[in-house]
Amino acid sequence: MMERNIETFIGCDSSYEEADIALFGAPFDSTTSFRPGARFGSSAIRHESVGLETYSPYQNQDLTDFHTFDCGDLELCFGSAEAALSDIEEKTAEILSDGKLPILVGGEHLVTLGAVRSVAKRYPNLHIIHLDAHADLRDDYLGTKLSHAAVMRRCHEILGDGRIHQFCIRSGERSEFEFAKAHTELYKFDLTGLSALTERLVKDGSPVYFTIDLDCLDPSVLPGTGTPEAGGIGFVQLLDAILSVSKTNIAGADLNELAPMLDASGASTAVACKILRELLLALHSNIKSGEDK
Amino acid sequence: MMERNIETFIGCDSSYEEADIALFGAPFDSTTSFRPGARFGSSAIRHESVGLETYSPYQNQDLTDFHTFDCGDLELCFGSAEAALSDIEEKTAEILSDGKLPILVGGEHLVTLGAVRSVAKRYPNLHIIHLDAHADLRDDYLGTKLSHAAVMRRCHEILGDGRIHQFCIRSGERSEFEFAKAHTELYKFDLTGLSALTERLVKDGSPVYFTIDLDCLDPSVLPGTGTPEAGGIGFVQLLDAILSVSKTNIAGADLNELAPMLDASGASTAVACKILRELLLALHSNIKSGEDK
Amino acid sequence: MMERNIETFIGCDSSYEEADIALFGAPFDSTTSFRPGARFGSSAIRHESVGLETYSPYQNQDLTDFHTFDCGDLELCFGSAEAALSDIEEKTAEILSDGKLPILVGGEHLVTLGAVRSVAKRYPNLHIIHLDAHADLRDDYLGTKLSHAAVMRRCHEILGDGRIHQFCIRSGERSEFEFAKAHTELYKFDLTGLSALTERLVKDGSPVYFTIDLDCLDPSVLPGTGTPEAGGIGFVQLLDAILSVSKTNIAGADLNELAPMLDASGASTAVACKILRELLLALHSNIKSGEDK
Amino acid sequence: MMERNIETFIGCDSSYEEADIALFGAPFDSTTSFRPGARFGSSAIRHESVGLETYSPYQNQDLTDFHTFDCGDLELCFGSAEAALSDIEEKTAEILSDGKLPILVGGEHLVTLGAVRSVAKRYPNLHIIHLDAHADLRDDYLGTKLSHAAVMRRCHEILGDGRIHQFCIRSGERSEFEFAKAHTELYKFDLTGLSALTERLVKDGSPVYFTIDLDCLDPSVLPGTGTPEAGGIGFVQLLDAILSVSKTNIAGADLNELAPMLDASGASTAVACKILRELLLALHSNIKSGEDK
Amino acid sequence: MMERNIETFIGCDSSYEEADIALFGAPFDSTTSFRPGARFGSSAIRHESVGLETYSPYQNQDLTDFHTFDCGDLELCFGSAEAALSDIEEKTAEILSDGKLPILVGGEHLVTLGAVRSVAKRYPNLHIIHLDAHADLRDDYLGTKLSHAAVMRRCHEILGDGRIHQFCIRSGERSEFEFAKAHTELYKFDLTGLSALTERLVKDGSPVYFTIDLDCLDPSVLPGTGTPEAGGIGFVQLLDAILSVSKTNIAGADLNELAPMLDASGASTAVACKILRELLLALHSNIKSGEDK
Amino acid sequence: MMERNIETFIGCDSSYEEADIALFGAPFDSTTSFRPGARFGSSAIRHESVGLETYSPYQNQDLTDFHTFDCGDLELCFGSAEAALSDIEEKTAEILSDGKLPILVGGEHLVTLGAVRSVAKRYPNLHIIHLDAHADLRDDYLGTKLSHAAVMRRCHEILGDGRIHQFCIRSGERSEFEFAKAHTELYKFDLTGLSALTERLVKDGSPVYFTIDLDCLDPSVLPGTGTPEAGGIGFVQLLDAILSVSKTNIAGADLNELAPMLDASGASTAVACKILRELLLALHSNIKSGEDK
């Protein structure tokens, strides 16, 4: 007997019941104002992951030793950001209520808002660790409140002051940096301040949502993104950040803004695949070390 | 004294006052469900038109003999189709009320709806001549009524039965073709029926909105479009259609769905430039022949 | 409960039991001597089929009205053509013995040999209808007998004289054309002779294996193939050929030599998707009309 | 003993002494006003010719049956059109004085002028058969007389009225078409008039220089050229033209304006390779039939 | 009333009168010997600057706080380097005589010579700070003196020994490095020596022409250039150099050798846009701090 | 008299007799399991080397001061790895027996096995220094022993324990790293340990085969490779490694896994060209310094 073709991120073919982590794609980029294409990010990461090993020599861990479920991409409505966000919110809520860790792969950065709505409902004292080239703190973009350029502003409306921690930021309007001074913790250019923060959050056990806009990486490492910004961090630095943040009490995470068609060499997608592998392994290790205690 | 850099479609540097035709771009592709990029269509056509001559050996006419104004691209809101359509509607109305012929360059096909709203307000007995690979007659797309795949259905709600004439259609759901049977005049695959139609419309003087989805062309001629559909018409056939339709009482027109980044050779953009030149020349000739009478 | 991500060619999500047609991919291009990349053909066709409708206005048929199964791609060994062919042969045999029609998507043209071995075992009086730019009749290629350039020669060794019918052929060594004169029925450049042939085969009910090398199409229509050859047929001509051949007693079929990365516009893949849809619909219609009798 | 790496167009590895035809490349595109890249044309054609057969099923001839020499590309000075033209003129003269037929592969169309200077010196009653999308009849381009857009005007200064026969022309300034009316024989859009012309030239035995700007082809067939112009001829039509023109008393020929980097699919280069093969075979056949008489 | 479409580099829409800095493009690459395309550099930088913010978090300055004028691209003659240089020289002279700082965006590096001629006429004691991968010190290139590979040699003829300061140089003929030893100050590979130099020049107030060949950057950061040379500097290092050099008495500056079509990801153009923004802000800050004194 | 077109890597046009080093290409990638294209590596490196200088400012050496022979690419059989390896083995043996140093340019990494077979026959105490992102230590890949992923395992079968020294390794199955612990010297991620090793090998004079898989470089530096792996070394680090390793008793060397079509910017090929130049210069210097003693 033959089965219909199943396609998952490499090493993520657990059933939903067994899984500790549930992965899903949110192929939405309808509010992207410059170069679109992030909608193809999640499926490219899944598709191209066959070029990757399940084993990480960085962490000496193997995805096949853990249980990860990949339910594929949501079918989201282009033309209605609110409808798309509702679908993401609902899927996240379902995964959370089943006691699994939700990992979202974008899509544009606005998709984070859908997930954060659900996670914040369950964990009102939620913190966000945000790696990005852009502050994403505009109040609106040409009149629309639901824009990738405003996503952290919307998250701030949910969580309030002092809960959003931003790193690698090197682009934004002057007013965004001023808003950040008053309401968020923003580190320009690099990861300065991250280890102090994670140490503190590990200690107090606060729930953390971890959102990685892949354009935090330098465009030399990841040119395949809508708005590449020179002056970013390298792969090894991002890997270190992931290992560090994953030790906190992660309640949800996402990876977004890969626009695979913009880098025909495939190198950007390959980098994104490896970052997802490392993120999954780090989160599984943390879950396991929690269970072992 | 130096002037700031002005960039217009080739041969379209008339002032607004003098112009008979006013050109504007609508760089919007927010509801595109498959491959985006039509947002770059209008600016690519303007930018690459320097590779074109102003003279057409097909019509033995030169753009420099006429007055065309190019006000550039509207700044449209990604993330709100309704806001974008309002802006297009308003711009079209302004041009119409100044007694000029509006020509819109998309963007995705949904932008047509903005222009048609304005033109139909002024000409309630408006007909639409629609060249496209796709019927665009869905009632909604994943719940949203304002979708490129539903644009002709929305136009039908404005104009009613028998006013929309569709040609070259070779893709759609079965239900769209059934809708067409009852409510529009739809010709599959090619331009069959077009000359009979234009003859009739020329005779009765009905106002006509002419919308050209560039994917009516075969993908061999224009691969640079979001959803290329094999089996389309050739350049010379489209040129003949333009010459024929331009003899009717044109009240507005558009050209849409060029996605220039999808064809890195630049040939698709070059084809679109030439089609716009021929369309402008044919419309100007018709205006002039009307004035001469 | 959530299901793991299933990905099939559009409209082909039947279970294996119910299906009349079973589709599988053979992502192998190890013997390609010029530009490789056909290995990505089957997965690109599956992946990009979301841009296609299930309904065909050409045949007025819809894939959702039939039962087609898609088991995805075989995992084939690069570096051993014989091992890859054995796997293809075995999979074909399994489908045939379950009473279903096997449709193979390549991969390079050599994969046809695996399928033909199985089909010819079951139907010793098999004919092959072969659409291709290349004769593929070399005895060997740099010493290897299992080469894409020799696949029809290998098929001839199985079936003997007068059983292979070749169309659209416009490239080959002089010796290949001489071999054809003696042993196959070869029509240069176009589809001349095809309707006479299918008429004859329909009449005598001979089993037919139908192999379509997509480079039979003109490179303007399908540039995304390893060895594009100017002077090919158009999409509508190929569609007509498919409708004609599908009326014979088809025992197996394949579509091969799409190299999607070579055409970054995606137009080649879109054409291949549509051809597969039309082939599936035509074969289903024929099966159904056989059952109805 | 090993030889240093020799690279020639496929089937053209005769020694200079034996050869009837001598091929050379002129990788120059310094005056190209729009998109450069024709400088890579000749080396791409040579390099990619390995994907081609030496045998033509169209002519039933094989390059290995003839003697063609390929001396590679000239090293031309970017920044001085006059120096480049002198080098081309000199190389052409050398080949002519050795009793061989010179075939030049461009490069931009200006390179033709270098060859025509030499050929016209030897054959003062020379005619030019010119296939091109562009009239190339400007008097100057931004002040420079040596421009690709003025090359036929320069040739006219050498040869005078009635000697230049232009086909497929579909782009130019109005004044160019007016110049043509008075001084050249210009057919718009297609090959109308060509067979009558060649018949006449065959009869009177006039020496003919045959220059093929590859943009005479439709951009669907050859998108890889600096200024693609919709509405061109197809491959088979060009092939027929080559077979027809080759029956005249050819004194020199060239193929130019392939810009291979503009068509990443490689299809444009493959078409150009095949056209060069067919041109070589047709010219060899004509030389041979002349010798046989 | 509507205005014709104006397109400027982001934040540079001052009128000419008000402006302190006047920007213009020199889209010329006619002497480029390897891969052309720098002609598209200036218009791509202008066009793609919409993806950039006007505010720099590096300098905490905003382009909207200053007055910059962008008059677009000169129309330069391909085929005559001398004519092109004259036009550049004249435009630079006009800007200088109006008391504004000229900033030139290339084009190939030869365009620098046009600007340097004008600036050196006004400031005979001019120094050049030259960031580049290539020494550009050849006496000629295949016989032509006006070549991108000889531009610093031509500048040396104007300015004499000890006035040209070269950094990041990692490619050239042996003889160029020998020439440099005798006549210029050349630092291989990186920015060693730059801060000492700028300190000295700030102190003595010498006028400085600052020319940045973008290939001083590593190809990982900027692959979109004609002759990428591994081993270059990073973005942050170049930014530091700009901040440092901008403190000297700048009399003119340029940015050149972006070939945008060579990097389809757009990342190279985005880097170039940001470098131009930072250069403009640094120069404006310096002008303002001069005025404030 | 004219010569047929000779094409060699820049500065490598010595005759075979005179040469100290003999270069040849092995355009084979038949076992590549992910993205093919390395077959085009050697010819792209040869072809694009015209953009490079023969002089190295890093080593202050010039290729024109040495004698290097380039015999071009072998014609290898796709579809039979064993046949291809035999041809490589034989060519290597011929060069060795003529007292020259063989340098092989791939092609996929499997080609190394052909060269190592020959070199190890002549130098049984051979060591291999292996720079690569991948361990290449699988016992087989889907059943085939001759796979690029197994090449170092095959070399280990020839040389035994302690002879293979691996650097920069950051990808592999867990079992490969375990195999390495027992049988090879493997350094993860970077060049740690290399200088200690070369010092030791210089001292004991052991013959060394030096194999460079270009994917040891970070994908930002060289995206044009089949399986890019984030986290690699930079160009200057690789250059240092080459200078260091070249001081040992080199008996053969190769450079492989450039897939030029995957990086359309050409930067990857340019990097590879420069690495080959530096490798050649370093090896020539070492040969010369040996002779001088």
Image: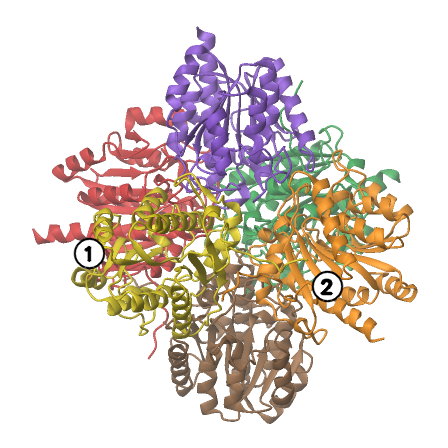
Chain colours: A red, B green, C brown, D orange, E purple, F yellow
Percent of width and height locating residue F151: 31, 65
Residue at image point 29% right, 24% down? A182
Percent of width and height locating residue F168: 28, 51
Q: What amino acid is labelled 1 in the image? A: Gln
Quadrant in which the N terminus of chain C is drawn: bottom left
| Cα distance between the residues tagged 1 and 2 | 66 Å
Please say whether residue E1 is visible from this viewpoint: no
Percent of width and height locating residue F155: 28, 66
Left or right: F113, with C159 as reference point: left
**Mark 1 lies on residue:** A61
Is F136 or C63 nearer to us in this picture? F136
Residue under mark 1: which chain is it in? A
Q: Nearer the viewer, mark 1 or mark 2?
A: 2
Is C167 or D62 nearer to us in this picture? D62
Is disc 2 placed on a helix, strand or loop?
A: strand
Q: Residues within 10 Å of mark 1 (few under 14, many from 20)?
A: some
Left or right: F41, with A99 as reference point: right
Q: Which mark is residue D21?
A: 2
**Compared with residue D276, is residue C108 higher up or lower down, i.e. above or below?**
below
Residue under mark 2: which chain is it in? D
Is F227 or D70 nearer to us in this picture? D70
Please say whether residue F122 is visible from this viewpoint: yes
Percent of width and height locating residue E114: 62, 25
The part of the image, by quadrant, that contains residue C76 is: bottom left
Left or right: A107, with E136 as reference point: left
Q: What amino acid is labelled 2 in the image? A: Ile
